[in-house]
Image (cartoon, rainbow, N blue to C red):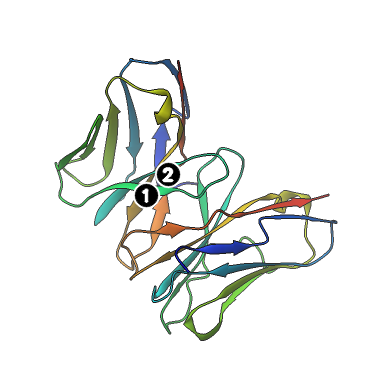
Amino acid sequence: TQLLEQSPQFLSIQEGENLTVYCNSSSVFSSLQWYRQEPGEGPVLLVTVVTGGEVKKLKRLTFQFGDARKDSSLHITAAQPGDTGLYLCAGILTGNQFYFGTGTSLTVIP
Amino acid sequence: GAGVSQSPSNKVTEKGKDVELRCDPISGHTALYWYRQSLGQGLEFLIYFQGNSAPDKSGLPSDRFSAERTGGSVSTLTIQRTQQEDSAVYLCASSPTGGTEAFFGQGTRLTVV
């Protein structure tokens, strides 16, 4: 069983639409990260959130850490084809171990 | 090097053979992680090295899997008597210290036939 569950698993949308990806757990994390992975490449870090309730914005991407530090969401406004990829959340527990989520595969259709 | 380097990039092996996968982390990074990823899925943790501490091997799926990290740098993941279910992409990541940003290599795609 995965420590972090992501939903949806697959998402296919038209260019210009908005979307939200969720990352949920029953565990409390010291921090949580979001990565994006393109085919044939390793994941690349997008953002780290540390404080419960924290909201970070990266251009059209908005990341939120839940108040209880058990969950997170990623919202993309006006999706572009360049946003296509596999989005992974990763929670860090004490001991500095990364626990990755189940992944959300996003396809943005031009 | 500039980033995490993994070799080989692709490996096709026959069932029952042993394979070794190599990871060269970013110089100076004390933490090194191995993950396994099935097609389009999330990452399954395998093993974590931090400095000179004993590695966290809790993710290794069976005793056919082992890993070592020599001199606090290069790491080798060994899979003995490979099975078809071992087919996956094996990703290595390093981190300046544990629990900060993970920098990933491009992975080794292992196919067991």
> What kind of element bears circle 2?
loop
Q: Between A27 and B79, which is closer to the camera in this rendering?
A: B79
Q: Going 28% across and 34% down the picture, which residue do you hit? A: A73
Mark 1 and mark 2 residues within 8 Å of each other at the beta carbon: yes
Q: Amino acid at mark 1?
A: Ala
Q: Which mark is residue B103?
A: none
Residue B6 vertical position relative to residue A71 in the rendered view, above or below: below
Image label count: 2
Give how far across and how far down residue A98 sits, in percent.
Answer: 39, 58
Answer with the quarter of the image where residue A7 lies. top left
Q: Residues within 10 Å of mark 1 (few under 14, many from 20)?
A: many
> What kind of element bears circle 1?
strand
Q: Chain letter of disc 1?
A: A
Give how far across and how far down residue B48 sits, in percent.
Answer: 47, 69
> In screen coordinates, is A44 left or right of B39?
left
Give how far across and how far down residue A17 sits, in percent.
Answer: 33, 15
- Toward the front, the furthest residue is B2
Q: Which mark is residue A101?
A: 2
Q: Is residue A28 visible?
A: no
Residue B49 vertical position relative to residue B7 in the rendered view, above or below: below
> Where does label 1 land, which residue?
A90
Quarter of the rendering occupied by the C terminus of chain A:
top left
